[in-house]
Amino acid sequence: MAYPFDPKLKHHLLIGLGLALWIFAFLYFTEPLDVSVFSQSEKLLYLPGYGLIGGVCYLVFLPFQYFLYKRTKPQWFLWQEAIFLLCFCVFAITVSRIYYLTVIMANDINPYTLGYMLSSIYLPALTTILPIIIIARYAFGKYKNKKLEATKIEIKGEGQYEGLKLFQDDLICIKSSDNYIEVFYQSGTLLKKTLIRNKLSKIDEEFEDILRTHRSYLINPLHFQQWKTENGKRFAQMSHNILLPVSKTYQDSISTHINSATRG
């Protein structure tokens, strides 16, 4: 199941900073375990350390997040989100336990056991802190998806519910087929085709970056790979080994446009 995800580092830096502040505020105002016996100066001395641990642990785990993302890019799935959050929580709890033993209780021979701290502070704290992380990550992911959706083009059909929305970079070519058009596009690494009731001339007028190579074909020059000549006829080879005819009427304009794009 796909899950909203934003890979931008600056947004995760904000989450890390917010997490550090939230943990400090949680400990300062709820005063779990022996925090209530700390003086004001001790609270300000020791509690920011827990906040820093939470924020830094989140940032330290980002390379692991990007490792998971690389496996399924450009999509992010719910199982990846769950694995990342689980590993982060285990790591953060481990580091905070070390901080408790080596800093908070450095001169005390009777620290709380790990089991007691898990049940009395770590797990209750996670029920308050983890939802903040989940909401922040989800919100940034939804915002990114919304911005991406706004960049899509829509190839409309004559029917009320006909049409196709896609990123222009994914569009490869469009073929006229009687009263319909066949739209060839890529989805991830797959080649897909959708049949829409419309005229090629209308699409040609609507999208200036889509070029006509033949009375029956339009191409997206971003997917042009090379020219081919067979039996004296010229063809444009596109992504996914799609071979399209180029009529003499359009050869010069197509060549000029593609050569210009290549030089740019």
Image (cartoon, rainbow, N blue to C red):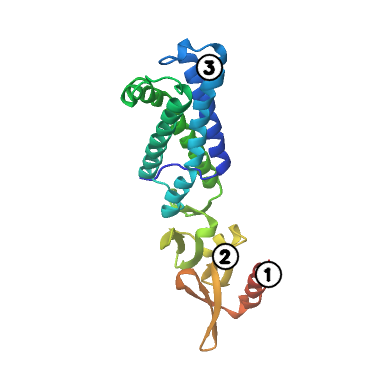
Contact flag, marks 2 and 3 (Cβ < 8 Å): no
Amino acid on which disc 1 is placed? Arg
Q: Which residue is mark 2?
A: 222
Q: CA distance from mark 2 to mark 3?
A: 59 Å
**Residue 4 seen in render:** yes
Closer to us: 59 or 82: 59
Amino acid on which disc 2 is placed? Leu
Q: Quadrant of the C terminus?
A: bottom right
Q: CA distance from mark 2 to mark 1?
A: 13 Å
**Residue 75 seen in render:** no
Residue 241's spot in the image, x, y percent?
A: 46, 73
The numbered mark, 2 or 3, whose residue comes first in the sequence reads 3
Q: CA distance from mark 1 to mark 3?
A: 62 Å
Residue 205's spot in the image, x, y percent?
A: 60, 60
Q: Which residue is mark 3?
A: 43
Q: Is residue 42 left or right of residue 180?
A: right
Closer to us: 11 or 167: 11
Q: Which residue is mark 1?
A: 263
